Amino acid sequence: MRSDTPTATTAPAPTTTTTLVHTPATGAAEWWRTAVIYQVYPRSFADASGDGIGDLAGITSRLPHLARLGVDAVWLSPFYRSPQHDAGYDVADYRDVDPLFGTLDDFDTMLAAAHRYRIRVIVDLVPNHTSNEHAWFRAALTAAPGSPERARYVFRDGRGPDGAAPPNNWTSVFGGTAWTRVTEPDGTPGQWYLHLFDTTQPDLDWTNPEVRAEFESVLRFWLDRGVDGFRVDVAHGMVKEPGLPDWAGSSSMIEGAHEGTTGSEDGSTGAGNQGPMWDQDGVHDIYRSWHAVLAEYDGDRALVAEAWVEPLSRLARYVRPDEMQQAFNFSFLTALWSAPVLREVVTASLEANDAVGAPTTWVLSNHDVVRHTSRLGLEVPGSKPNGIGAGDPQPDEALGLRRARAATLMMLALPGSAYLYQGEELGLPEHTSLDDDERQDPTWWRSEHTERGRDGCRVPLPWAADEPAFGFSPTGAAWLTQPESYRRYALDAQRGTAGSTYEVYRSALRLRREFRLGSGSLAWVDGLPAGAHCTVLAFVNRELLVITNFGPDALRLPADLTLVHASDDLPVADDDAVLVPPDTTVWARLTA
Ligand code: NOJ
């Protein structure tokens, strides 16, 4: 592997010091503590029917890919009956599959096949809001103010003499007001209903026992079918501060989302939603009752919180022993590409979760954020624009991919459970030049076309370079046009090619399992090389030393280490020392 030798820092490792921040939990062996969980976004994963929208049969057909990759579980974004105003996060019937994705039989077939491959299946649960086409909401619209039908949602009279002003000043996460006024059955302008997201996503009132009973029943419906758990959408938003007080801040993911934050000692990186609609203490009662429901079933079923809550000590309250099993670590996802920032976030994450006996989770990409391959290629690497369009500053594709592979290898060596988002194993970049006319994310129009939103990370996957729609669908149809560049990222262009992103991921998952990194420990290593604390992140987990080089110069790998894995090719110096170039992670064995 000898190649051009970049400038290397001269100091080899003199004296190193270690700081232990996490030891394995003893006696806790549930699968979700260490699992690698792969997010399937059904409409963009694989389309068996040929209509251009991925489906359950498509997922079943591609399970061998996931088994070969080596993941432990999949999480499926919503496939329930829905008018698809927010890509299925607007559910009209929680107990049925939308015809776009297939049938309940298709679901059962997929679940059984996944289990045969020893892949567990987590489904998405969307309890903060329903679709406006849900039977409950339709009934609420035809019922009178004050009726039991309206009491399932958050209906209020408007302000001002004629009630023409919204009940409070809250804004929607997608932009604009969080309230919509209804026309009463007699044709007069009526009450307003709350929607923290789109108009088509009315918020449920979780103080209503009927709502609680209904969702416990929905949980049982899917648990009885055999699912292994639930990813709980907007887990921090279901209970609002009583009285719904005005709030000077904004809920919008539009504001404040662009700049990366530099981190702080408590590990916060700007991932926490603020205000009287988020993270209210009452949500925890809901999760205690759900914990009890899951405990009636065998097989260590799990609840995963999608909660944009900071600091991490506050997020850890969702995973106390009698609540959920995991919470997504968005502080990690939103951290800038910086050794000190990541060190703070990782330390704070492990400390906060250890304090409640929960595993820490790690995630870099999902269907709501610009893919990390592209975020890490931006001028401020790791900053988080709300979508990228053709007229925006473009990420450096090669640099972003290089950093993304380094970030992923660092993540997969951390103790705990890791999430992968479909396509990241191919190194897929964000589609940053999608035609604006194709955009479907409500963010695009609710922001009056100022924020491009999330379509760019949701483009259908390329499976085969030379097939129609790169193998996504048999007809060549694709609900969002794939960029031509996806041809070179196709799975069949990478499988079996040493050094391809796919093979780097695959080896990483195999080695992660072999070295039992998920259930391991973490000790930071300083002084490797001397004085590079700000540009090197190094830690030990079991027998592995993991080094990520964030600096501009290559590092020399200490001679007493045996290389196990690397995110990219490693050059060799004239004296045969292995070099770790900038934006690279290596896994090395401590003893030969
Ligand atoms: C979080 C989901 O991940 C996102 O895609 C959705 O738009 C909102 N919750 C609303 O359900």
Image (tube, grey):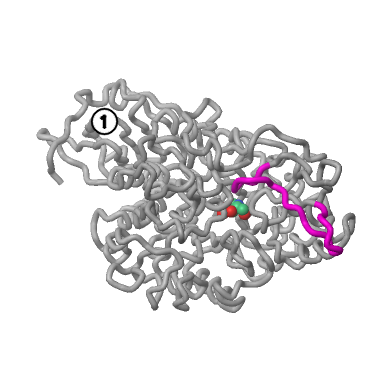
Above or below, 265 against 430 in this view is above
- Find residue 11 and report its horizontal and vertical position in percent: 22, 23
Three-letter amino acid code at disc 1?
Answer: Pro
The residue to which callout 1 is attached is 552
Picture quadrant where residue 271 is located:
top right
- Find residue 240 and report its horizontal and vertical position in percent: 75, 43
Picture quadrant where residue 414 is located:
top left
Question: Helix or strand or loop: what does disc 1 sit on?
Answer: loop
Above or below, 210 against 401 in this view is below
Q: Is residue 154 left or right of residue 74?
A: right
Residue 174 part of the magenta segment: yes
Above or below, 570 against 57 in this view is above
Q: Which residues are magenta?
A: 171-191
Q: Is residue 504 left or right of residue 283?
A: left
- Find residue 150 and report its horizontal and vertical position in percent: 83, 57
Q: Residue at x 24, y 37 (%)?
A: 581
Q: Nearer the viewer, residue 528 or 56?
A: 56
Q: Is residue 30 visible?
A: no
